[in-house]
């Protein structure tokens, strides 16, 4: 049985909260927790030259999380349209949130992609690209990129929490202008 548009929208209503600034900030925190623990572990692995295969997997896993979350952040404005939340009286405020999420999403997406490239270079056979003896420097670059992605998420959390104190009905003030 096919659902009508109205029925589909009713099914989506419980998920609307996921694009609120507070929910996005909370998801950022949930992502930051394993990211920070991973970066600390990676630094230790690089420092003592622990088996690099586990470190490569760690960089790759966290990078994939950043890539996925970056895409979701980038498209907050599209999700607002899907949830029929566009065109409200607080549209200018929402647009400011969309812009902050878009910029942060692009940042973590690109940093995650390049961190993933670092880890995948190590996995390539040395006859294709010889990375023998360069595993730890590549892991260090990947770790730095993941750390920068974490900083972007922290900055977005601060912006989102700060946006909650902005009057939403003022058409002249967007969250970006309040900082």
Image (cartoon, rainbow, N blue to C red):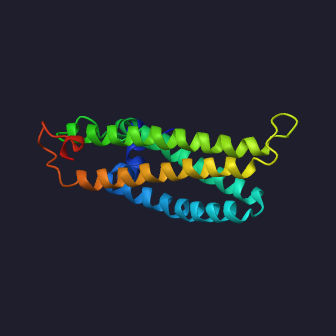
Question: Horizontal and vertical percent for residue 69?
Answer: 50, 47
Q: Nearer the viewer, residue 128 or 165?
A: 128
Q: Can residue 1 be seen in this snapshot? A: no
> Which quadrant does the N terminus fall into?
top right
Q: Is residue 82 above or below residue 46?
A: above
Q: Residue furthest right?
A: 127
- How many tags in the picture? 0
The answer to whether residue 168 is seen in the rendering is yes
* Residue 166 on image: x %, y %: 17, 50
At 64% from the left edge and 53% from the top edge, which residue is drawn?
59
Residue pictured at 50% horizontal, 64% vertical: 33
Residue 32 relative to residue 134: left or right: left
Residue nearer the viewer, 62 or 86: 62
Q: Determine which quarter of the picture holds residue 41.
A: bottom right
Residue 136: x %, y % from top left: 71, 52
Left or right: residue 161 compared with residue 73: left
Name the residue nearer the viewer: 179 or 141.
141
Q: Residue at x 78, y 45 (%)?
A: 123
- Location of residue 44 with respect to 11 vertically, above or below: below
Q: Name the spot of residue 30 as percent of width and height, x first.
A: 47, 61
Q: Residue at x 60, y 48 (%)?
A: 63
């Amino acid at each position: 049985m096919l659902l009508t548009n109205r029925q589909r929208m009713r099914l989506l209503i419980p998920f609307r909260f996921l694009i609120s600034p507070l929910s996005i900030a909370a998801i950022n925190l949930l992502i930051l927790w394993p990211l920070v623990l991973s970066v600390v572990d990676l630094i230790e692995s690089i420092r003592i030259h622990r088996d690099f295969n586990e470190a490569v997997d760690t960089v790759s896993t966290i990078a994939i999380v950043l890539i996925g979350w970056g895409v979701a952040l980038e498209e907050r404005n599209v999700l607002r349209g899907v949830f029929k939340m566009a065109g409200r009286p607080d549209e200018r405020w929402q647009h400011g949130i969309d812009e902050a999420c878009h910029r942060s999403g692009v940042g973590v997406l690109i940093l995650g992609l390049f961190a993933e490239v670092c880890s995948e270079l190590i996995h390539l056979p040395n006859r294709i690209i010889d990375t023998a003896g360069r595993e730890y420097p590549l892991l260090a670059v990947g770790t730095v990129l993941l750390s920068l992605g974490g900083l972007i998420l922290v900055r977005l959390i601060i912006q989102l929490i700060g946006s909650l104190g902005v009057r939403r009905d003022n058409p002249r003030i967007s969250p970006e202008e309040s900082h």
